[in-house]
Protein backbone atom coordinates (compact mmCIF):
# COMPACT_ATOMS: atom_id res chain seq x y z
CA UNK A 1 0.00 0.00 0.00
CA UNK A 2 2.87 2.37 0.82
CA UNK A 3 4.36 1.69 -2.60
CA UNK A 4 1.00 2.35 -4.28
CA UNK A 5 0.92 5.79 -2.68
CA UNK A 6 4.59 6.76 -2.86
CA UNK A 7 5.41 5.95 -6.49
CA UNK A 8 2.67 8.16 -8.02
CA UNK A 9 3.75 10.95 -5.67
CA UNK A 10 7.33 10.66 -6.93
CA UNK A 11 5.98 10.76 -10.49
CA UNK A 12 4.09 13.93 -9.64
CA UNK A 13 7.30 15.52 -8.34
CA UNK A 14 9.33 14.42 -11.36
CA UNK A 15 6.82 16.14 -13.64
CA UNK A 16 7.93 19.50 -12.30
CA UNK A 17 11.14 19.02 -14.29
CA UNK A 18 9.10 20.71 -17.00
CA UNK A 19 9.74 23.98 -15.19
CA UNK A 20 13.41 23.61 -16.12
CA UNK A 21 12.56 23.04 -19.77
CA UNK A 22 10.92 20.31 -21.84
CA UNK A 23 14.35 19.03 -22.87
CA UNK A 24 15.15 18.24 -19.22
CA UNK A 25 11.96 16.20 -18.95
CA UNK A 26 12.69 14.41 -22.22
CA UNK A 27 16.20 13.62 -20.97
CA UNK A 28 14.66 12.11 -17.82
CA UNK A 29 12.41 9.95 -20.02
CA UNK A 30 15.49 8.84 -21.94
CA UNK A 31 17.20 7.77 -18.70
CA UNK A 32 14.15 5.76 -17.63
CA UNK A 33 13.85 4.06 -21.02
CA UNK A 34 17.57 3.30 -21.10
CA UNK A 35 17.29 1.77 -17.61
CA UNK A 36 14.43 -0.43 -18.77
CA UNK A 37 16.28 -1.47 -21.91
CA UNK A 38 19.50 -2.38 -20.08
CA UNK A 39 17.70 -4.25 -17.28
CA UNK A 40 15.47 -6.32 -19.53
CA UNK A 41 18.26 -6.89 -22.08
CA UNK A 42 20.41 -8.34 -19.29
CA UNK A 43 17.57 -10.67 -18.31
CA UNK A 44 17.09 -11.59 -21.98
CA UNK A 45 20.75 -12.54 -22.25
CA UNK A 46 20.54 -14.72 -19.14
CA UNK A 47 17.72 -16.84 -20.59
CA UNK A 48 19.72 -17.74 -23.74
CA UNK A 49 16.69 -18.00 -26.10
CA UNK A 50 16.82 -19.58 -29.56
CA UNK A 51 17.37 -16.79 -32.09
CA UNK A 52 15.76 -18.78 -34.91
CA UNK A 53 12.58 -19.55 -32.95
CA UNK A 54 12.37 -15.96 -31.74
CA UNK A 55 12.67 -14.57 -35.27
CA UNK A 56 10.05 -16.98 -36.59
CA UNK A 57 7.71 -16.01 -33.77
CA UNK A 58 8.07 -12.31 -34.59
CA UNK A 59 7.74 -12.68 -38.38
CA UNK A 60 5.12 -15.46 -38.42
CA UNK A 61 3.15 -15.16 -35.18
CA UNK A 62 0.79 -17.97 -34.22
CA UNK A 63 -2.02 -17.09 -31.85
CA UNK A 64 -4.38 -19.40 -30.06
CA UNK A 65 -7.73 -18.27 -28.73
CA UNK A 66 -6.23 -18.18 -25.23
CA UNK A 67 -3.57 -15.60 -26.14
CA UNK A 68 -5.62 -13.09 -28.16
CA UNK A 69 -6.22 -10.88 -25.13
CA UNK A 70 -2.49 -10.68 -24.38
CA UNK A 71 -1.66 -10.01 -28.05
CA UNK A 72 -4.16 -7.16 -28.31
CA UNK A 73 -2.91 -5.81 -24.99
CA UNK A 74 0.68 -5.74 -26.27
CA UNK A 75 -0.42 -3.49 -29.16
CA UNK A 76 -2.03 -1.10 -26.70
CA UNK A 77 0.87 -0.98 -24.25
CA UNK A 78 3.40 -0.34 -27.05
CA UNK A 79 1.52 2.39 -28.93
CA UNK A 80 -0.45 3.89 -26.00
CA UNK A 81 -3.00 6.21 -27.68
CA UNK A 82 -2.45 9.06 -25.23
CA UNK A 83 1.09 9.38 -26.56
CA UNK A 84 -0.40 10.72 -29.81
CA UNK A 85 -1.55 13.79 -27.87
CA UNK A 86 1.73 13.93 -25.95
CA UNK A 87 3.86 14.02 -29.11
CA UNK A 88 1.49 16.51 -30.73
CA UNK A 89 2.21 18.90 -27.88
CA UNK A 90 5.93 18.22 -27.54
CA UNK A 91 6.57 19.12 -31.18
CA UNK A 92 5.22 22.59 -30.45
CA UNK A 93 8.04 23.14 -27.97
CA UNK A 94 10.59 23.17 -30.81
CA UNK A 95 11.48 26.56 -32.20
CA UNK A 96 11.05 26.24 -35.97
CA UNK A 97 10.95 28.96 -38.58
CA UNK A 98 7.61 28.00 -40.11
CA UNK A 99 7.99 30.62 -42.83
CA UNK A 100 10.68 28.47 -44.46
CA UNK A 101 9.33 25.33 -46.08
CA UNK A 102 12.69 23.57 -45.99
CA UNK A 103 12.99 24.02 -42.22
CA UNK A 104 9.50 22.63 -41.64
CA UNK A 105 10.17 19.62 -43.87
CA UNK A 106 13.45 18.96 -42.06
CA UNK A 107 11.65 19.09 -38.71
CA UNK A 108 8.97 16.69 -39.95
CA UNK A 109 11.65 14.24 -41.06
CA UNK A 110 13.29 14.32 -37.64
CA UNK A 111 9.94 13.92 -35.87
CA UNK A 112 9.16 10.88 -38.02
CA UNK A 113 12.51 9.32 -37.15
CA UNK A 114 12.01 10.11 -33.46
CA UNK A 115 8.57 8.48 -33.37
CA UNK A 116 9.75 5.43 -35.30
CA UNK A 117 12.73 4.95 -32.98
CA UNK A 118 10.52 5.32 -29.89
CA UNK A 119 8.09 2.65 -31.14
CA UNK A 120 10.95 0.35 -32.16
CA UNK A 121 12.64 0.62 -28.76
CA UNK A 122 9.32 -0.04 -27.04
CA UNK A 123 8.82 -3.10 -29.24
CA UNK A 124 12.30 -4.44 -28.47
CA UNK A 125 11.80 -3.99 -24.72
CA UNK A 126 8.53 -5.92 -24.94
CA UNK A 127 10.29 -8.66 -26.92
CA UNK A 128 12.90 -8.91 -24.15
CA UNK A 129 10.29 -9.23 -21.41
CA UNK A 130 8.00 -11.61 -23.33
CA UNK A 131 10.92 -13.85 -24.29
CA UNK A 132 12.18 -14.10 -20.71
CA UNK A 133 8.80 -15.23 -19.40
CA UNK A 134 8.08 -17.52 -22.34
CA UNK A 135 11.45 -19.22 -21.95
CA UNK A 136 11.07 -19.60 -18.20
CA UNK A 137 7.42 -20.41 -17.60
CA UNK A 138 5.46 -21.17 -20.79
CA UNK A 139 3.83 -24.58 -20.57
CA UNK A 140 4.73 -25.08 -16.91
CA UNK A 141 2.36 -25.77 -14.02
CA UNK A 142 3.16 -22.49 -12.29
CA UNK A 143 2.43 -20.31 -15.35
CA UNK A 144 -1.12 -19.49 -14.19
CA UNK A 145 -0.01 -18.51 -10.69
CA UNK A 146 2.58 -15.93 -11.74
CA UNK A 147 1.72 -12.24 -11.39
CA UNK A 148 3.41 -8.89 -10.88
CA UNK A 149 3.68 -9.44 -7.13
CA UNK A 150 5.49 -12.78 -7.14
CA UNK A 151 7.20 -12.87 -10.54
CA UNK A 152 10.50 -11.56 -9.15
CA UNK A 153 10.75 -14.51 -6.76
CA UNK A 154 10.03 -16.98 -9.55
CA UNK A 155 12.67 -15.38 -11.79
CA UNK A 156 15.18 -15.56 -8.96
CA UNK A 157 14.39 -19.22 -8.38
CA UNK A 158 14.62 -20.01 -12.10
CA UNK A 159 17.78 -18.10 -13.06
CA UNK A 160 19.54 -17.64 -9.73
CA UNK A 161 21.52 -14.71 -8.39
CA UNK A 162 25.16 -14.27 -9.26
CA UNK A 163 26.94 -10.94 -9.27
CA UNK A 164 23.74 -9.14 -10.29
CA UNK A 165 20.71 -11.01 -8.86
CA UNK A 166 17.96 -11.11 -11.47
CA UNK A 167 15.38 -10.27 -8.80
CA UNK A 168 16.89 -6.78 -8.36
CA UNK A 169 17.46 -6.30 -12.10
CA UNK A 170 13.76 -7.01 -12.66
CA UNK A 171 12.80 -4.61 -9.86
CA UNK A 172 14.90 -1.79 -11.33
CA UNK A 173 13.46 -2.31 -14.80
CA UNK A 174 9.91 -2.49 -13.47
CA UNK A 175 10.38 0.69 -11.43
CA UNK A 176 11.69 2.55 -14.49
CA UNK A 177 8.75 1.27 -16.55
CA UNK A 178 6.27 2.40 -13.90
CA UNK A 179 7.72 5.89 -13.66
CA UNK A 180 7.91 6.30 -17.45
CA UNK A 181 4.33 5.11 -17.97
CA UNK A 182 2.90 7.19 -15.13
CA UNK A 183 4.71 10.36 -16.17
CA UNK A 184 3.80 10.11 -19.86
CA UNK A 185 0.18 9.31 -19.05
CA UNK A 186 -0.11 12.17 -16.59
CA UNK A 187 1.69 14.58 -18.89
CA UNK A 188 -0.60 13.63 -21.80
CA UNK A 189 -3.64 14.07 -19.55
CA UNK A 190 -2.45 17.56 -18.64
CA UNK A 191 -2.16 18.54 -22.30
CA UNK A 192 -5.51 17.01 -23.23
CA UNK A 193 -7.39 18.79 -20.45
CA UNK A 194 -5.53 22.04 -20.96
CA UNK A 195 -6.10 21.94 -24.71
CA UNK A 196 -9.72 20.82 -24.96
CA UNK A 197 -10.95 22.68 -21.90
CA UNK A 198 -8.77 25.72 -22.62
CA UNK A 199 -8.12 26.23 -18.92
CA UNK A 200 -7.14 29.81 -18.13
CA UNK A 201 -5.24 29.27 -14.89
CA UNK A 202 -1.77 29.87 -13.59
CA UNK A 203 0.62 27.32 -15.03
CA UNK A 204 1.43 25.61 -11.72
CA UNK A 205 -2.25 25.44 -10.66
CA UNK A 206 -3.32 24.05 -14.02
CA UNK A 207 -0.58 21.43 -13.77
CA UNK A 208 -1.68 20.39 -10.26
CA UNK A 209 -5.35 20.06 -11.26
CA UNK A 210 -4.82 18.21 -14.54
CA UNK A 211 -2.16 15.88 -13.16
CA UNK A 212 -4.30 15.09 -10.13
CA UNK A 213 -7.09 13.93 -12.45
CA UNK A 214 -4.64 11.43 -13.94
CA UNK A 215 -2.79 10.24 -10.83
CA UNK A 216 -5.52 10.18 -8.14
CA UNK A 217 -7.74 7.57 -9.92
CA UNK A 218 -4.63 5.41 -10.38
CA UNK A 219 -3.89 5.57 -6.65
CA UNK A 220 -7.51 4.72 -5.79
CA UNK A 221 -7.49 1.66 -8.05
CA UNK A 222 -4.15 0.52 -6.60
CA UNK A 223 -5.54 0.76 -3.06
CA UNK A 224 -8.78 -1.06 -3.93
CA UNK A 225 -6.97 -3.98 -5.56
CA UNK A 226 -4.08 -4.01 -3.10
CA UNK A 227 -5.38 -7.13 -1.35
CA UNK A 228 -6.19 -9.05 -4.54
CA UNK A 229 -3.10 -9.90 -6.58
CA UNK A 230 -4.89 -11.88 -9.29
CA UNK A 231 -7.54 -9.18 -9.76
CA UNK A 232 -4.83 -6.54 -10.18
CA UNK A 233 -3.10 -8.62 -12.87
CA UNK A 234 -6.41 -9.15 -14.66
CA UNK A 235 -7.17 -5.43 -14.46
CA UNK A 236 -3.77 -4.61 -15.90
CA UNK A 237 -4.37 -6.91 -18.89
CA UNK A 238 -7.76 -5.40 -19.62
CA UNK A 239 -6.38 -1.87 -19.34
CA UNK A 240 -3.88 -2.71 -22.08
CA UNK A 241 -6.73 -4.11 -24.20
CA UNK A 242 -8.67 -0.90 -23.57
CA UNK A 243 -5.70 1.11 -24.82
CA UNK A 244 -5.79 -0.88 -28.06
CA UNK A 245 -9.50 -0.16 -28.46
CA UNK A 246 -8.84 3.55 -27.91
CA UNK A 247 -6.19 3.76 -30.65
CA UNK A 248 -8.70 4.59 -33.44
CA UNK A 249 -10.20 7.40 -31.36
CA UNK A 250 -6.76 9.04 -31.19
CA UNK A 251 -5.46 8.27 -34.68
CA UNK A 252 -8.53 8.79 -36.90
CA UNK A 253 -9.05 12.48 -35.93
CA UNK A 254 -5.30 13.01 -36.36
CA UNK A 255 -5.38 11.43 -39.83
CA UNK A 256 -8.34 13.63 -40.78
CA UNK A 257 -6.41 16.73 -39.75
CA UNK A 258 -3.11 15.89 -41.46
CA UNK A 259 -4.94 15.04 -44.70
CA UNK A 260 -6.63 18.47 -44.92
CA UNK A 261 -4.87 21.10 -47.02
CA UNK A 262 -6.40 23.98 -45.03
CA UNK A 263 -4.66 22.60 -41.92
CA UNK A 264 -1.39 21.21 -43.26
CA UNK A 265 -0.99 23.17 -46.48
CA UNK A 266 1.54 21.55 -48.80
CA UNK A 267 2.55 19.11 -46.03
CA UNK A 268 -0.71 17.16 -46.05
CA UNK A 269 -0.42 13.40 -46.51
CA UNK A 270 -1.35 11.88 -49.87
CA UNK A 271 -4.30 9.63 -50.66
CA UNK A 272 -2.20 6.45 -50.67
CA UNK A 273 -0.73 7.15 -47.23
CA UNK A 274 -4.14 8.13 -45.91
CA UNK A 275 -5.66 4.79 -47.01
CA UNK A 276 -2.73 2.82 -45.57
CA UNK A 277 -2.77 4.67 -42.26
CA UNK A 278 -6.54 4.36 -41.89
CA UNK A 279 -6.41 0.57 -42.19
CA UNK A 280 -4.43 0.13 -38.97
CA UNK A 281 -6.72 1.97 -36.49
CA UNK A 282 -9.74 0.28 -38.08
CA UNK A 283 -8.07 -3.14 -37.87
CA UNK A 284 -7.30 -3.01 -34.13
CA UNK A 285 -10.92 -3.19 -32.82
CA UNK A 286 -11.60 -6.10 -35.18
Image (cartoon, grey):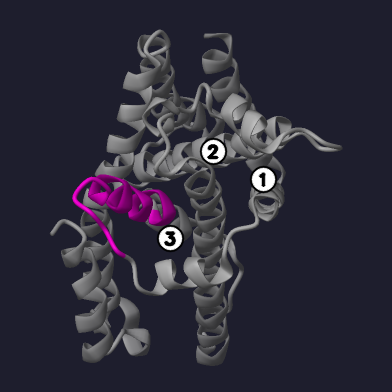
Q: Does residue 66 show up magenta in the picture? A: yes
Of callouts 1 and 3, the N-terminal one:
1
Q: Nearer the viewer, residue 261 or 235?
A: 235
| Residue at the image point whose x is 33% and y is 79% from the top | 264
Instruction: State the residue position of label 3.
Output: 88
Answer with the quarter of the image where residue 192 lies. Answer: top left
Q: Which residues are magenta?
A: 62-79
Instruction: State the residue position of label 2.
Output: 183
Answer with the quarter of the image where residue 276 lies. Answer: bottom left
Circles 1 and 2, Cβ within 8 Å, touching? The answer is: yes
- Element on which disc 2 rests: helix
Report the mark closest to the observer, 1 or 3. 1
| Residue at the image point whose x is 52% and y is 49% from the top | 135
| Residue at the image point whose x is 54% and y is 29% from the top | 151
Answer with the quarter of the image where residue 213 lies. Answer: top left
Mark 2 Cα within 10 Å, few/some/many (few <14, many 20+)? Answer: many
Main SS of the magenta part reads: helix
Instruction: State the residue position of label 1.
Output: 32
Q: Nearer the viewer, residue 149 or 118?
A: 149
Compared with residue 113, is residue 14 higher up or lower down, i.e. above or below?
A: above
Task: Locate the C terminus and report the quarter of the image it occupies.
Answer: bottom left
Mark 3 Cα within 10 Å, few/some/many (few <14, many 20+)? Answer: few
Mark 1 Cα within 10 Å, few/some/many (few <14, many 20+)? Answer: many
Report the mark closest to the observer, 1 or 2. 1
- Element on which disc 1 rests: helix
Of callouts 2 and 3, the N-terminal one:
3
Q: Position of residue 66 (x, y in %)?
A: 23, 45
Q: Is residue 20 left or right of residue 203?
A: right
- Element on which disc 3 rests: helix
Amino acid sequence: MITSLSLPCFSFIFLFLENYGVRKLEAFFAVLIATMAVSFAWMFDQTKPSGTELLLGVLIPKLSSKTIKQAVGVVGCIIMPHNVFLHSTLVQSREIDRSKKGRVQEALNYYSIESAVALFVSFIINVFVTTVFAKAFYGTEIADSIGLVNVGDYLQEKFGGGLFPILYIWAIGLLAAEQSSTITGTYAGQFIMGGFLNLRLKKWLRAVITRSFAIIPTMIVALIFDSSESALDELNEWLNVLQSIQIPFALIPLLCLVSKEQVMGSFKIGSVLKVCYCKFPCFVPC
